Image: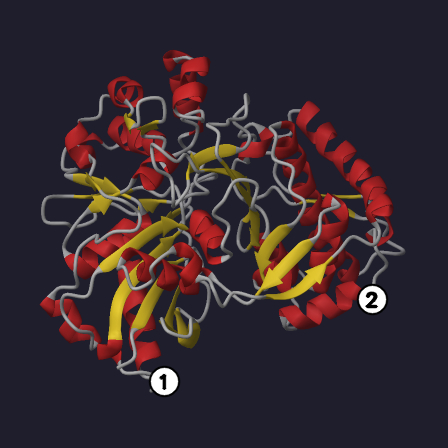
Amino acid sequence: MPMLLLGIDVGTSSIKVSIVDATTQQCLASAQFPETEAEIISPFTGWAEQSPDSWWQYAQQAISKANASGAYHPHDIAAIGIAYQMHGLVAVNKQQQALRNSIIWCDSRAVEIGNKAFEAIGEEVCLKRLLNSPGNFTASKLAWVKANEPAIYEQVDKIMLPGDYIAMQLTGTVTTSISALSEGVFWDFSTDTLSADVLNYYGFDTSVIPEIRPVFSTHGTVTNAVASALGLKPGIPVAYKAGDQPNNALSLNVLQPGEVAATAGTSGVIYGVSDALTYDPQSRVNSFAHVNYAPDAKRVGVLLCINGTGILNKWTKNITGSSKSYAALNDAAAAIPAGSDGLFVLPFGNGAERMLNNKLTGAHIQGIDLNKHTEAHLYRAGQEGIAFAFRYGLDIMRENGMRPSIIRAGKANMFLSDVFTQAFVNATNTPVELYNCDGSIGAALGAGIGAGIFASEQEAFAQLKPLQLVTPTKATEYDGWYQQWKHYLLQQLSNNSF
């Protein structure tokens, strides 16, 4: 009898699921829902919310769609893993009902709350114990609810991250992990306990924190009702839960110190693993417990996040009224010379950017020549601007001791574009190894580790092979264009244009 693994990736744009054969580690079927991009609710500038109930509806639709493929028997699924968009806040009452929309990762409303906490708790204390400023993370978002929606706050029984909510719907059980708590800035790395500094400053009761379990462990089992509705066996364990970036690193077998992963979806991320409790003095890049973190074997994920990545690519497509596919846009961009004939794009139009000290610079287009530049120039300049943003962030990581000799990435999203991939490699002057993997497949393999189906992490990724190695070819030229791009960025920052 085949032993299958179900991975669920709770993304911002959609929910994707994959079914993986544990024996061959091959994906048998994948599905996503909705087909078009899910709504981000933004009633005010800097706000970004999504409905947790919509996530659950989308997850059920995606699972049913995959089951309908006929590529496997749903009763052969032996374990479930979940990856999810990081830093979101979901609050539920005692009946496990969501009390409000989730305040998601790119929402900026709690920036000042986090800044005040950073100052009040003490910058040195926060950095040494939390490895971060409280910033705009989950704890500060909960503080915003407490201050602005007291009637809702009074009803809160448990808080959780987006993937925890899907696991709760599947199993009726609410759990968390050290990795999850660290990404919400609730974890004290100096004591390996919940942060008394954060809880006391914000006035949170520890009762709102779910039971803490290892990332790779049973986080509840599928209920009879859910199993019946989705054609699954009751009692299947949810055996793995992790944020999308630690999970992306897992899916690329990035688990040991010095290994580095990247992704470029709605947001862009470089994620490196360290065995030291490292932090950036300005909290421009952030450190969280990796999926394999343990008090006696520190594995810290150092995360650079750029909010405005794939969303900029989508915007350039929509704003030009183009009905072309993204592949056609990439072809058009490829026909424009590298450097985009002097057109530069700052891609920071999707909320406060942590690597820019939580500034809201907005997106900008610089150097427009009305006699020269075309739509295709905009497509290329946008992709190059994203690559330059990665270079800016990677330089911050280099300041803090993370100097990758190679970066691993899934051949997906922006890395499907040869223009972007070459710009990324040349701008950062770092080779990229591309793999055929994604978050839902990584979550499925994580479930196999958590359920003990694989004897080790190494066994889970024994079949992972690179598709392609992309090496720098124009690093010197791209460094020149990057310096011009950086000049425009620093101008915006110094002009207080945010």
Q: Secondary structure at mark 1?
A: loop
Q: Quadrant of residue 444?
A: bottom left
Quadrant containing the C terminus in the rendered view: top right
Type of amino acid under label 2: Ala
Establish if 359 lies above or below 86: above
- Of all residues shown, which one is farthest toward the front? 455
Q: Where is residue 323? Give x, y as percent.
A: 63, 72
The residue mark sitting in front, 1 or 2, is 1
- Of all residues shown, which one is farthest toward the bottom? 70
Quadrant containing the N terminus in the rendered view: bottom left
**Can residue 364 be seen from the camera position used here?**
no
Residue located at (38% from left, 39% from top): 293
User: Which mark identifies residue 335?
Assistant: 2
The colour scheme of the drawn protein is secondary structure
Type of amino acid under label 1: Ala
Left or right, 490 with reference to 87? right
Between 96 and 164, the residue placed more toward the observer is 164
**Can residue 317 be seen from the camera position used here?**
yes
Measured in 3D between alpha carbons, the distance from the residue under mark 1 to the one under mark 2, in whole angstroms, is 40 Å
Q: Where is residue 422? Give x, y as percent.
A: 74, 57
Q: Which residue is mark 1?
A: 71
Q: Quadrant of residue 73?
A: bottom left
Mark 2 is surrounded, within 10 Å at the Cα level, by few (under 14), some (14 to 19) or many (20 or more) other residues, namely few
